[in-house]
Image: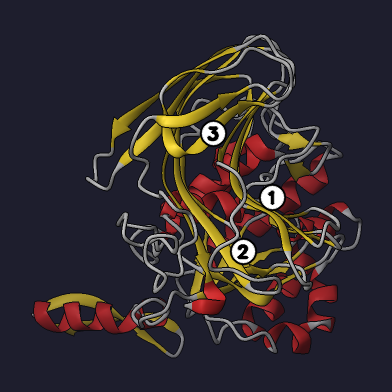
């Protein structure tokens, strides 16, 4: 006989069991998480809580984007796109406390999803609303209400210092939350999200330099680190589910049974364009047929283009070796011309690409997106890691992954004026450099799946 644990009504409980029974118990206990991805479709996720997760999304009259300062977007990229977002996924609100979330609980639980992400507690503590004990009581209520599905909680992360009492409250709340994993069903706490951005030498529970946008929120560089911590915590439980193009035949212009719109998705040939529409130095080298690499601003940096075989055997990667980038310099990889076949206004599109980055300096954004225009109207954007004018330089640990936009409809109308898949590479200050690999670009027309 051996000693083991199983998941009972009150969490993990000890019991004696044979090794094979123990294995069965572990599998059964993980069922809530495993069940979220064991079906044919990816799990559907939503975001709950305060502004840290509200910053996952950006929706305007002309934009339906995921943002680069959203940690969950980085996590999903690193995991290889492990989850899809619910239609009403953004249930996080700027300034929300535990009381506010409880007041909106019926609306939150009304969103059809498989897993929930939660960031909460910061506004209780730093908004002078509650002590550590009171914040714990509020979080306990929220955890209770959301215990019906896997709940991934991002603890109170470091921010600008106010006073020692608040630091003590934050440490107390985070310690309590971590311990709750032993007694609560379906709760996962990403404890290392704190470690990812903290200044370990400070006694004031503050973030390391260059990782916050102001006093509270993660910037793109901070979000990448928190996202990596989320991905590490969920690795193995929620595997990547990205559906990247895998064949030159899977292209509507070649085979109109395909709902993949790019005519040359595996990046073959070397007849692509090298342009400098911004007036800067034009790229050199080889660009895949059906695509262009454009120096989009009047910078003086250089970009050497080449094609390298992918390790997975599916075509080539377009390599961009950028050096000497000026402040605000930008290079764009895009399909040549505009896509007009296999798609109509109002249909739902989603773009993906495997984008890897190394040897970078002063790099502030690498962003895959759909750019579209219908009937000559406003240009619409659907971005995977939307950049901001105040983006910081990414740390060396930012190495990319599989980017994916939301599934979003083109504007209604009569005629598509312009439609392209693009990848922007941007730099924040002079002396920028990066080695970028772009592979298996994919543009699905989900209305014709």
Task: Please give the label number shown on residue 67.
Answer: 1
Distance Cα–Cα, label 2 vs label 1: 11 Å
Q: Residue at x 69, y 33 (%)?
A: 211
Q: Which is closer to the viewer, label 2 or label 3?
A: 3
Work out whether 257 lies above or below 251: below
* Mark seen at residue 292: 3
Give the SS element for disc 2. loop
Q: Secondary structure at mark 3?
A: strand
Q: Going by the image, does 86 lie left or right of 388?
A: left
- Residue at image position (83%, 58%) is 123
Q: Is residue 183 above or below residue 188?
A: below
Where is residue 58 drawn, in percent x and y? 77, 57
Residue 118 picture quarter: bottom right
- Count of numbered labels shown in the rendering: 3
Q: Tell me whether circle 2 and circle 3 mark residues in contact (CB < 8 Å).
A: no
**Disc number placed over residue 39 in the picture, else none:** none
Mark 3 or 1: the one toward you: 3
C-alpha gap between disc 2 and disc 3? 24 Å
Q: Position of residue 156 (x, y in %)?
A: 69, 53
Q: Nearer the viewer, residue 142 or 409?
A: 409
298 above or below 307? Answer: above
Q: Which residue is mark 2?
A: 406
Q: Residues within 10 Å of mark 1 (few under 14, many from 20)?
A: many
């Amino acid at each position: 006989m051996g000693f083991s644990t199983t998941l009972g009504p009150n969490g993990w409980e000890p019991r004696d069991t044979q090794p094979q029974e123990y294995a069965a118990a572990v599998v059964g206990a993980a069922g809530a998480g495993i069940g979220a991805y064991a079906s044919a479709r990816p799990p559907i996720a939503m975001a709950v809580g305060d502004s840290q997760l509200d910053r996952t999304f950006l929706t305007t009259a002309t934009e339906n984007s995921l943002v680069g300062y959203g940690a969950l977007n980085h996590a999903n990229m690193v995991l290889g796109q492990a989850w899809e977002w619910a239609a009403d996924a953004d249930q996080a609100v700027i300034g929300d406390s535990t009381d506010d979330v409880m007041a909106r609980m019926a609306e939150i639980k009304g969103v059809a999803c498989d897993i929930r992400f939660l960031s909460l507690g910061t506004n209780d503590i730093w908004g002078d609303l509650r002590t550590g004990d009171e914040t714990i009581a509020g979080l306990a209520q929220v955890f209770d209400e959301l215990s019906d599905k896997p709940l991934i909680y991002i603890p109170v992360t470091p921010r600008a210092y106010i006073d020692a009492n608040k630091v003590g409250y934050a440490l107390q709340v985070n310690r309590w939350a971590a311990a709750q994993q032993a007694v609560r069903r379906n709760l996962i706490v990403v404890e290392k999200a704190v470690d990812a951005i903290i200044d370990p030498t400070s006694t004031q529970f503050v973030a390391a330099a260059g990782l916050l946008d102001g006093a509270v929120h993660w910037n793109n560089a901070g979000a990448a680190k928190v996202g990596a911590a989320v991905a590490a915590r969920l690795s193995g439980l929620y595997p990547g589910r990205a559906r990247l193009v895998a064949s030159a035949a899977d292209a509507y212009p070649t085979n109109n049974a395909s709902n993949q719109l790019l005519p040359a998705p595996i990046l073959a040939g070397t007849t692509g364009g090298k342009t400098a529409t911004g007036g800067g130095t034009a790229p050199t080298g080889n660009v895949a047929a059906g695509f262009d690499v454009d120096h989009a601003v009047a910078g003086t940096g250089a970009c050497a283009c080449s094609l390298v075989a992918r390790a997975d055997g599916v075509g080539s990667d377009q390599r961009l070796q950028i050096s000497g980038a000026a402040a605000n310099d930008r290079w764009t990889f895009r399909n040549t011309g505009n896509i007009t076949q296999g798609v109509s206004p109002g249909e739902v599109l989603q773009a993906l690409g495997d984008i890897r980055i190394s040897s970078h300096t002063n790099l502030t954004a690498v962003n895959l997106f759909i750019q579209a225009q219908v009937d000559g109207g406003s240009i619409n954007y659907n971005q995977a890691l939307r950049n901001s004018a105040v983006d910081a330089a990414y740390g060396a640990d930012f190495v990319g992954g599989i980017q994916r936009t939301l599934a979003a409809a083109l504007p209604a109308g009569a005629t598509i004026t312009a439609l392209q898949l693009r990848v922007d590479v941007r730099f924040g200050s002079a002396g920028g450099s990066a080695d970028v690999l772009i592979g298996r670009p994919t543009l699905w027309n989900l209305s014709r799946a």
